[in-house]
Image (cartoon, rainbow, N blue to C red):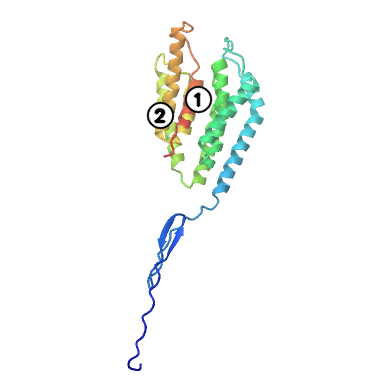
Amino acid sequence: MPAGLVTPAAPALPDTSVVLDMFVVPAPSAGSAPSAVPVTPAVPGGSAMSTGSVVLVVAIVLAVLCVVPGLTRMVGFFGPVAGEQPRRPAPTRDTLGLLTATVVVAFAAKLTDHVAWLPAYAYLGVVGVLLAAVDARVHRLPDVITLPSYPVLAGLFGIAAVLDGGPGRWVRAVLVAVAVLALFTAFWALPGAGLGFGDVKLSGLLGGALGWLGVPVALTGLLAGIALAGVWALVLMVTRRAGRRTSIAYGPFLLTGAFVGVLGWNAG
C-alpha cells in the first residue's frame, strides 16, 4: 500500500429494530449469530379430534334414542317377586328417553377429551337407567341385565385401555370392582342390613366403572349412593310412610351416586 494513503473506516451499522406485535426485537450486530425465535408448533389433528368427538357423541345419542322403545318394554316385562304388586307404573317412553339421553349426554360432555372411554360410559348410562327404572317399580335388579354387563364393560374398558396405550386403568378398575363386591357382600350378610343380593351384584359393576377413574371417585360415588338411600329412608320414616323394617330400592340410589361420582371426577 502506498505511503500516505489511509483506508477509510467502515461506516457504523445503524441501530435498527423490528417491531412485531408491539414487541421490539433488536437487530443482531455484525458478526453475531441471530438468536432463535421460539415458535409454538401447531398440533396436528387437533380439529379432527374435536370433530371426531362430536361425531361419536351424536352417534351414541342417536343410538340411545333408537333403543329407548325397547327399554320401555323391558321395564314393563320384569314383574315383582311372587305375591307382591308393582310399586309404581312403568315410566313412559318420553320420560325414559329424556332421562337416558340426559345421562348419556352428561357423561359425553364430561369425558369429551377421552373419546375411547365414551362407549363404556354410554353403555353404563343406558343400562343404569333401565336398572333404576325396574328396581324402582318392582324392587328387582334382574341378573339377565346385571351379569352380562360385567363382560361387556370389561371389554369396552379393555378396548379403551388399548387405545390409550396402557393397561393400568383397566387393572385398577378390576381390583376396585372385586373390593367393592366383597365389601357389599359383607354388608349384605349383616342382620337387618336391608340390601338385596341384586344390590351386591350391581355394586361390583359400579365399582369397576368408577374405579376406572380412580379410587377416590369410587369412594365418592358409592358413599353418595349410600347417603342418598339413607336420607330417603329417613324421610319415609319421618313422614310415617315407612317403618324400620320397610324395604326400599337401593339400586336407583347407588346408580345416582355413580352418576355423581363420574360427573365429579377431576382429570387433573
Which percent across, then down, holds residue 154?
51, 37
Could you tell me the amino acid type at mark 1? Leu
Name the outermost residue toward the front. 4
Residue picked out by circle 2? 219
Given residues 175 and 69, the one toward you in this image is 69
Given residues 259 and 70, the one toward you in this image is 259
Residue picked out by circle 1? 255
Q: Residue 22 is drawn in which quadrant? A: bottom left
Q: For residue 159, which numbered disc appears in the image?
A: none
SS for dot 1: helix
Does the CB distance between marks 2 and 1 fall below 8 Å? no
Which percent across, then down, holds residue 48?
58, 48
Could you tell me the amino acid type at mark 2? Leu
Above or below 27: residue 89? above
Upstream in sequence: badge 2 or badge 1:
2
* Residue 55 shows in this picture: yes
Given residues 60 and 140, the one toward you in this image is 60
Q: Residue at x 38, y 79 (%)?
A: 10
Above or below 22: residue 199? above
Which percent across, then down, holds residue 253?
48, 21
Which percent across, then down, holds residue 61?
61, 33
Above or below 110: residue 17? below
